[in-house]
Structures are given as C-alpha cells and as structure tokens.
Image (cartoon, rainbow, N blue to C red):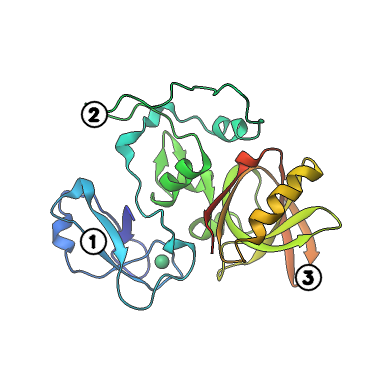
Amino acid sequence: MNYAYKDTGRTKIIYADSSDIIKYKGVRCYCKNPSCNAKMFIHNPEHPNFAYFQASGKPSHNGSCGSIYNHFDNSKYDEKLFSFPEVLMNLESKPSGTKPTGKSSPKKGKSTSGGEKALKTIKEIYKMATNTPPNDSYNGVKIKNILADVRSYSDYKDGIDGYHLVECNFYCFDKKEKTIIMNFPFLPNNKYYLRLCFKDEDLFKKEYSRFYDTGHTGIIVISGLWEKKDEEYRTKTIKAECTIKSEKQIAIIKKK
Ligand SMILES: [Zn+2]
C-alpha cells in the first residue's frame, strides 16, 4: 500500500514515498482499514519512490484491504486529465468499435516527467483511490467522494447518492426481479445492502455467472449513478441502488 498509519487511532498518516521513510524500517504501522489489525511494515524504504507497505505475520488483513492492488504508480498517469464524474459516465456507454482515445500504447523508453494518460477504467481509478487516504484529493476531487468503501463509510451510512465507485461484495441474486444484492461495506464490515438493477435481461444473465464465481468474498467494484433507498430486505436494509447499463461498470478485483 502507498500509505499506512502510525497509530492505532488512524490519525497520523505515513506515506510510503516520504523522504524520511527509512526511519520506519522495522516499525509496526497500521492498515488503512480501521477495522483491520494487520501489522504493516515498510518495504524498500531505501528507495522511497518504490517503497510500499505490506502486512506481515498474524493477524492477516480483515477485509478488502488485502487485495492485490497494494500499490499505485502515480508516474504513469497525468492527474490533470482526470475528470470526475465524467470518467464514470463514460463507463455507462456501450463499448464501441472505435476506441475513444485509442492511441494504443504510449511510446515506451524515455520516461518523461509525469504520466501521459488519464485514469480511465474502474481498475485504474480504484487502484489510485484505494491507495490514497480518503481525505486526500486527486485532481481536486476528494478520494472519499470518488470511492465509497470501509474507510469512508461514515460519509455513506445513510446511503449512496450520485456518481461513485463502490467497493462491495456479492450477497444474493433476486432472480424474480432480475437484480443483484450486494454487501456494503465489504465483508466482514458490512452494514447494509445495495441493489444492482440491469438495463436488460441479457446483461443480468451475463453478470450472473461472473458474480456467482466470486462466492461472496470476491472484491467487486461498481461504477454508476447511485440513488438512496430505504427498504427492508431480509436481515438488513437496502440503502442504495444503481442501474447497470454496460459491463464496463463492473470490475471484479479479486475472485475469491
Ligand atoms: Zn488490512
């Protein structure tokens, strides 16, 4: 991870790329997830630009914080090109034959200062957001306004409204309604449900098998326009809903 905390109360952030990160070599730090007790240690502190935090020993991560996306390389992207929520609106459109800003791969070799491309896919945006403290900003947008997750739960305890990425995991299918119910935040910190509606039955069927394969513990990130709800459902409440119009709105970050 690109950051951790110095204290168990999660008030003092420590960034892996701090120039004095060497001071933390062998010092136990705390996971970004406030309900996780994993012991975080700095790796590669001799080279701050390549340093990162990783859990070591027991207990292991308790939730989505243990995902493979534990490092974001900011040098690959141009932060100024990030426009939110337009980037999420683009994900709702059908994949077209022509790539929007195609230009395939930027020329490798000489690395210029700063990246050349914008964060565009869910996975790219998620990788940035999950590795950046929720109160920090990316091109002027607060991380907690981009991604709703266990770190920003207090801002979303009454539901989710507007365009956001949401980190969640699969709870159940509602075959009759052709909807999918998700846990939020990610297990085992779940507090309420989200409902995913689908533009048409084909899309629902297609996603059905992808979600089924995650077996409740896979990390799923949904991008879309959320609307607050307040409906009792089984043991909890559905507090937000989002309509999926394109498969680009769904990213399976971790399968199981
Ligand atoms: Zn953790």
Work out whether residue 183 can be spotted.
no
Taking the image as shown, residue 88 lies to the left or right of residue 44, namely right
Q: Residue at (34%, 51%) from the top-left corner?
A: 71
Residue drawn 75% across the image and 53% down it: 229
How many C-alpha atoms fall within 10 Å of the one at disc 2: few (<14), some, or many (≥20)? Answer: few
Nearer-the-camera pick, 208 or 3:
208
Percent from the top left, x then y, of residue 95?
Answer: 63, 30
> For the residue carrying disc 1, how many other residues have a C-alpha within 10 Å: few (<14), some (14-19), or many (20+)?
many
Q: Nearer the viewer, mark 1 or mark 2?
A: 2
The reply, left or right, for residue 232 in relation to residue 1 is right
Mark 1 secondary-structure assignment: strand
From the viewer's perspective, tell me whether residue 201 is left or right of residue 189.
Answer: right
**Residue 234: assigned label:** 3
Rendering coords of residue 50 (x, y %): 22, 48
The disc, 1 or 3, on the residue closer to the chain's N-terminal end is 1
Which dot, 2 or 3, sits closer to the camera? Answer: 2
Q: Quadrant of residue 59?
A: bottom left
Mark number, residue 42:
1
Q: Is residue 107 above or below residue 184?
A: above
Q: From this viewpoint, which residue is outermost toward the right?
A: 176
The residues bearing labels 1 and 2 have C-alpha atoms spaced at a distance of: 26 Å
| Residue plotted at (62% across, 66% down) | 215
Asked whether disc 1 touches disc 2, contact meaning CB atoms under 8 Å apart, the reply is no
Residue bearing the label numbered 2: 111
